[in-house]
Image (tube, rainbow, N blue to C red):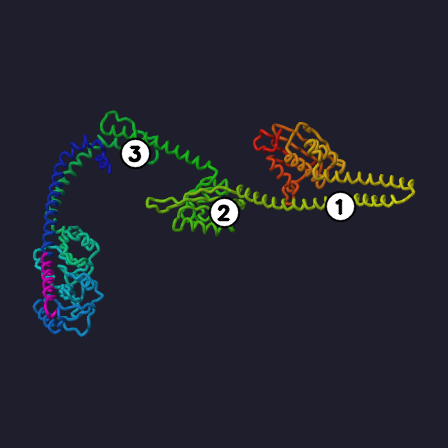
């Protein structure tokens, strides 16, 4: 092996070529050339002889077929045949069989495909209507040659020649005994090892030399049948291996019949027999040259150790280190500029280029890995059936579900196991339908999945089938990302819509209650007062009829005084009702004055101390926002009375950085987090919705045992999101 490496080294051009190849190669080249030339000449002669013999055999068989055509053409013109004279036709056919012993039968076929008359006596009717060649003859009206057939009366292998009787719907036929084909005068010209073949259009052997009896009626090997098809309409040559190591050159020629009724003639010549003589000479010459070359190489190997091998070992060792992954390996200079030195320099340049490109590839891989691992989603590749496992999954899977990529890849069924039981069947059905169906393109689904801690997350899974060059799906490339917050927002939005509907129903109920209360107030208070006035007026009318003027005047004055008191009370009731519906001070003096009045009235009515601070006097709002902020303030005071158990309320209304800020703070029990979002907290819900309509924000903070602070921020003009109906 060491000496062989020396021979393969580039420096052999300066050392070993002078020692060995100059002496051996010319002789070896001349020997090879002469052997190849002899092979070429012999091969050309073999092809010519093969085609010549094939055409000769085909010509002889073609003459026999043409003779059959002419014979049938003549029969079709005879009166006995055309008139359907059975006795006359039969006698004619019997005489023909005696005259032409290589035919098995002559006869006629009627339009139903049945043998109407035959030269052979048969008690059993013969029906040929199911034979393709009979149907073809009746259909085309042309001369037709059948494939391999067995004659029913004699049991002999035959081929049928069929010719239509012009003007009549019937045919005449002749059945040729296949064993007669071997009598074709070609066997004597065949060299040793040659084969003579006649095939029908189905590839069935009609005749073979040698071993005719064994092969006749057998289906030839597929490659020769293919060859027959390739040779349609032209002569062909092909080399085919037979049993063992025998290789034959087959010549194929076609005897044209009607469509799909061709007969193929083939002669196969043994290449081994044809090249035996020249191969013996060639092998002897090559062996002699090889012996001389071996002796010369043995002498050269001794000098190769001194001049070549040591340097070549260093080059081979460096190559192996480079192949093992040591990209820093280099070869030191040899001190001269021969072929090995040039090769060492080229090796160093190659190693440096490979090291540089490997570094670039690693950098690109690192950038891609960094990009994949930083995007807030999981990337993966998987088989088309996702239930079978995963090829690759990015590290983000661990931060989302708690499983490392190694754990995920180790358990092919982990994804199916983690699917939420209520979503598992649906997701698997969707993946089967979208990825394994007729289109097999895209899979998109949202489903719940369990984390390592058994928490439930919502994932959105999108995968696309990666296709090969034949546009066939091979594997999936997909992404998964956490949409739990989005689902939570959707649920919150849905819950908000439900609460809004409940709020609308509650507001309608409150409105009806308020109408009822106002009606009751008007009925009870104003009704009583007006009834009293009516009674007093009736009394005055009665007393005016008393003739005692002094007594009458005194009574009238007392009653008028009582009526004035009743009227004053009625006016107060009207003012009270009007103020509760909408305080007049809000329209006359604006929001700051209305808040001060409401705080004072709240303190007088409930006994809860109210402290106001930072109330601006230059605040000018339109009617709608003023009413909304005032109603928000009223609702906050109502909540304090109902739920806070407070003794003191601090109220602040101020402008700051383009915002109007209303802050109400009590010293009550303090609202809890659950109470902020209770489904039936219609008061706070109404506050939030009113603030949202004004483009503002609200915050509610409670400290247990220390009270609750509600802050309302409404944008003033000039701020983004400020409603058009607010003005400075």
Splitting the image into 4 quarters, where does residue 125 fall? bottom left
User: Of callouts 1 and 2, which one flags the residue occurring earlier in the amino acid sequence?
Assistant: 2
Whole-percent x and y of residue 418? 49, 48
Locate residue 226 relative to residue 354 in the image: left or right.
Answer: left
Tag of residue 523: 1
From mark 1 to mark 3, how far is it between C-alphas?
112 Å
Along the viewing direction, whichever of 379 and 348 lies nearer the viewer: 379
Q: Can residue 324 be seen?
A: yes
Task: Report the residue at 46% width, 36% height from top.
Answer: 374
**Residue at mark 1 to residue at mark 2: CA–CA distance:** 61 Å
Nearer-N-terminus badge (3/2): 3
Residue tagged 2: 447
Q: Main secondary structure of the magenta part?
A: helix
Please indicate, yes or no, whether residue 391 appears anywhere in the rendered image. Answer: no
- Vertically, is 183 above or below 475? below
What residue sits 75% from the left and 40% below the top? Answer: 574
Residue range corresponding to the magenta coloring: 59-81
Location of residue 324 with respect to 494 vertically, above or below: above
The residue that mark 3 highlights is: 319
Q: Nearer the viewer, mark 1 or mark 3?
A: 1
């Amino acid at each position: 092996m060491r000496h062989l490496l020396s021979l393969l080294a580039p420096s052999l051009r300066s050392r070993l070529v002078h020692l060995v190849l100059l002496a051996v190669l010319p002789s070896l080249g001349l020997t090879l050339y002469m052997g190849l030339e002899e092979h070429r000449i012999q091969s050309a002669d073999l092809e010519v002889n093969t085609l010549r013999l094939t055409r000769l055999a085909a010509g002889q068989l073609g003459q026999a077929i043409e003779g059959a055509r002419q014979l049938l053409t003549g029969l079709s013109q005879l009166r006995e045949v055309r008139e359907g004279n059975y006795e006359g036709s039969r006698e004619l056919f019997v005489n023909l069989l005696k005259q032409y012993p290589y035919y098995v039968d002559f006869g006629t076929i009627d339009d139903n495909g049945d043998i109407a008359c035959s030269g052979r006596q048969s008690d059993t009717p013969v029906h040929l209507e199911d034979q393709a060649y009979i149907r073809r003859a009746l259909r085309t009206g042309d001369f037709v040659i059948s494939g391999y057939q067995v004659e029913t009366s004699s049991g002999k292998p035959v081929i049928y020649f069929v010719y239509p009787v012009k003007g009549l719907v019937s045919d005449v036929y002749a059945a040729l005994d296949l064993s007669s084909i071997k009598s074709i005068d070609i066997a004597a010209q065949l060299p040793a090892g040659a084969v003579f073949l006649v095939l029908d259009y189905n590839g069935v052997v009609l005749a073979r030399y040698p071993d005719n009896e064994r092969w006749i009626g057998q289906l030839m090997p597929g490659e020769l049948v293919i060859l027959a098809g390739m040779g349609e309409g032209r002569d062909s040559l092909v080399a085919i291996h037979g049993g063992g190591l025998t290789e034959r050159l087959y010549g194929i020629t076609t005897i044209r019949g009607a469509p799909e009724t061709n007969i193929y003639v083939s002669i196969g010549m043994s290449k081994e027999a044809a090249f035996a003589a020249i191969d013996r000479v060639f092998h002897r010459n090559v062996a002699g040259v090889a012996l001389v070359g071996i002796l010369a190489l043995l002498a050269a190997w001794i000098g190769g150790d001194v001049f070549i091998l040591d340097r070549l070992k260093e080059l081979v060792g460096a190559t192996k280190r480079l192949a093992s992954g040591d990209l820093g390996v280099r070869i030191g200079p040899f001190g001269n500029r021969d072929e090995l030195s040039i090769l060492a320099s080229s090796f160093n340049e190659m190693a440096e280029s490979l090291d540089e490109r490997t570094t670039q590839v690693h950098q690109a891989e690192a950038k891609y890995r960094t990009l994949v691992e930083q995007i807030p989603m999981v990337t993966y590749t998987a088989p088309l059936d996702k239930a079978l496992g995963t090829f690759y999954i990015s590290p983000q899977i661990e931060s989302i579900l708690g499983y490392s990529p190694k754990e995920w890849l180790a358990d092919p069924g982990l994804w199916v196991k983690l699917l939420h039981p209520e979503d598992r069947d649906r997701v698997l059905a969707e993946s089967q339908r979208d990825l394994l169906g007729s289109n097999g393109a895209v899979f998109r689904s949202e489903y719940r999945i369990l984390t390592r801690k058994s928490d439930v997350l919502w994932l959105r899974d999108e995968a696309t089938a990666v296709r090969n060059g034949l546009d066939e799906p091979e594997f999936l490339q997909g992404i998964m990302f956490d949409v739990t917050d989005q689902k939570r927002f959707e649920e919150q939005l849905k819950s908000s819509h439900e609460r809004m509907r409940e709020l609308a129903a509650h507001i309608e109920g409150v409105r009806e209650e308020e109408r009822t209360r106002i009606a009751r107030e008007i009925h009870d208070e104003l009704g009583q007062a007006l009834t009293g006035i009516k009674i007093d007026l009736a009394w005055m009318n009665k007393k005016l009829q008393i003739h005692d003027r002094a007594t009458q005047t005194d009574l009238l004055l007392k009653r008028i005084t009582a009526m004035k008191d009743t009227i004053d009370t009625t006016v107060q009731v009207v003012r009270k009702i009007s103020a509760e519906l909408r305080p007049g001070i809000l329209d006359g003096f604006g929001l700051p004055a209305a808040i001060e009045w409401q705080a004072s009235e709240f303190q007088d009515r409930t006994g809860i101390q109210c402290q106001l601070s930072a109330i601006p006097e230059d605040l000018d709002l339109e009617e709608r926002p003023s009413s909304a902020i005032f109603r928000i303030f009223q609702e906050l005071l109502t909540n304090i009375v109902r739920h806070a158990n407070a003794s003191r309320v601090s109220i602040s209304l101020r402008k700051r950085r383009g915002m109007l800020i209303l802050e109400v703070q009590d010293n009550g029990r303090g609202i809890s987090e659950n109470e902020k979002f209770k489904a039936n907290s219609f008061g706070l819900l109404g506050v939030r919705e009113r603030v949202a309509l004004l483009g503002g924000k609200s915050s509610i903070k409670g400290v247990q045992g220390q009270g609750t602070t509600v802050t309302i921020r409404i944008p003033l003009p000039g701020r983004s999101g400020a409603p058009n109906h607010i003005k400075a």
